[in-house]
Image: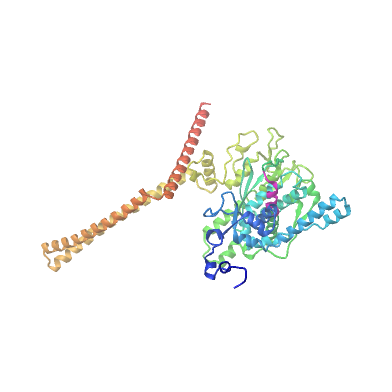
Amino acid sequence: RTVGIPYRMKKASRKPSLKQRKRIRRKNRRGVGALYISRNQALRKLQLNLKEFRKLCILKGIYPQEPTKRFRSQNKTFYFTKDIRFLLHDPLIPIFREFKIWRRRLTSAKAKNKLERVENLRKSKPKYRLDHLIRERYPSFNEALKDLDDCLCLISLFACLPQTKLLKSSRVASCAQLCREFNHYVILTRSMTKSFISIKGIYYQANIQGHTITWLVPHQFTPKIPKDVDITVMLTFLEFYETLLGFVNYRLFLSIGLRYPPIIDHVKLNDANFLNSMRFEAGAEEMDESEKATEAEMKEVFPDYSQAVIDSQKAEKDFKNLFAGLKFFISREVPREPLEFVIRAFGGAVSYEGAQGTYPESDPSITHQITDRPTVNKSFTREYLQPQWVFDCVNTKILLPAHEYWINAKLPPHLSPFVDDEKTGYIPERRQKLNEMINIAKGIYPNESKETDEAEDADLMDEADSEDELEATKFVEDRYAKELERERAGKTYSSVVRNEDDGAKATMVEKIMKRKRDQKVEQHKFREMMIPSRRKRNAYYHSLGIKKRKFGHVKDIIAKRAKLDEQKNEQ
């Protein structure tokens, strides 16, 4: 017992026991609270400011999460705790801190007017690479191809933007060069499948190594950057996507036996001859032997190689060479880059005005001239068409009649190949005509198809009638055979009837019991349908609303089409 301190106070100041310490629960250390962490807590843990944290999350692919149960205030942004722990060991964090120190030293040197110090600091600016992030986020090449849609859309957008304080002209030029390299690969491999002109821009779709990639390229005019768009966030995405597309282009060109990056001819590049300004050298690797195998070799390797597979491959080959053997000339008033890209992607030859054109406009071997002027000095050895003909031919996979796309002709509707008309419930008149043209190109005529369908239906009806007759005759023959067996056995009519009645009663009891069981099951299902849960009821009503809106929209389109037909007939 110490002097001057009461015994009770000394006893009360003892540490809690182990059992008492186990009972103490710290806040958000268990349950749902342990899975999430707020943004402010993450900033304190990583020792970064908000701008650096946002950039790091975008580069690493970590996004805010919504907790399953709100255990804190409603105005907070949450992340997974495991994601923040994952960020702690990233090599970009020390580089961000070095950059912060470098920027502080640079501002200090500028304030003190130390010019030599400023120049030395600018030369020693911290730099970083994102190669480890590409390997981390995309362990295989197939996963990188799956995420290529957004990458191509964003890089194509920045390739059309004007120069600003944040966006340098060299950045815009590098984006345009990456897009041209990818387009050149699509041309070499004939990978394009669809193309569509819309108000937003031109949609392209390509099948690359079994993956369908769809991207949007803006129209060729200089857009204005809206003030409500945070360009810094988009530049962070662009920084990551530039690295990703560089890796993808390298692997794609390496797969077809070409070295990457290409050699740039700056003379052609300055003359706006973009696709021809790149020259690729042969690499060490070559294409796989399976890609070079002919149909005869495939039949030798695979004896069960069916004719249907051969026909489908032949049709695909014909589609890839849709414009093979045709020579196009693009007039100066027509946007050259998209038309050159589409025509060359299907084997056509392209030229245009200027010193970099492969052949002049007066060349007599030109088969099609793409123009958009009402009057032009015509030559009778070629077709003068509007640009829509090229895109409609690609979407229908056939060469459409040229008279609908002549210079002064009224163009038909440009239908989107990305819309399934059967699912929408309305098939436009133009789609029906295009389907007929496609069938005729395949050798299927409308009258012949109807006759063949009717003949097949008649054959099916005859087969069904013959099957019914066979079953009836078989039933009669079996019944007659049973009666003969009863007569040979010497059974009387009454005993046979009694046994049959007993068997009939047993079967009747089984049928009644089965019917009762089926009725109970149906009643149970009916109760479930009549009294579902609130979530199921809301989903059911939501689906009904979608169907009503869909059919209402289809009715409006049909009524509008009927009015247009009436106006045409009146004229």
The residue most toward the front is 4
Relative to 61, residue 439 above or below: above
Q: Quadrant of the N terminus?
A: bottom right
Main SS class of the magenta portion in the image: helix
Q: Is residue 133 left or right of residue 533?
A: right
Residue nearest the viewer, comparing 17 with 23: 17
Q: Is residue 563 left or right of residue 52?
A: left
Q: Position of residue 501 (x, y in %)?
A: 16, 60
Q: Position of residue 159 (x, y in %)?
A: 71, 47
Instruction: Name the residue rendered at 65%, 61% in the picture.
Output: 87
Q: Which residues are magenta?
A: 229-239
> Residue 94's quadrant in the figure?
bottom right
Residue nearest the viewer, comparing 381 with 529: 529
- Would residue 128 be seen by someone viewing this image from the given angle? no
Residue nearest the viewer, comparing 217 with 230: 230
Colour logic: rainbow
Instruction: Name the residue rendered at 60%, 36% in the picture.
Output: 411
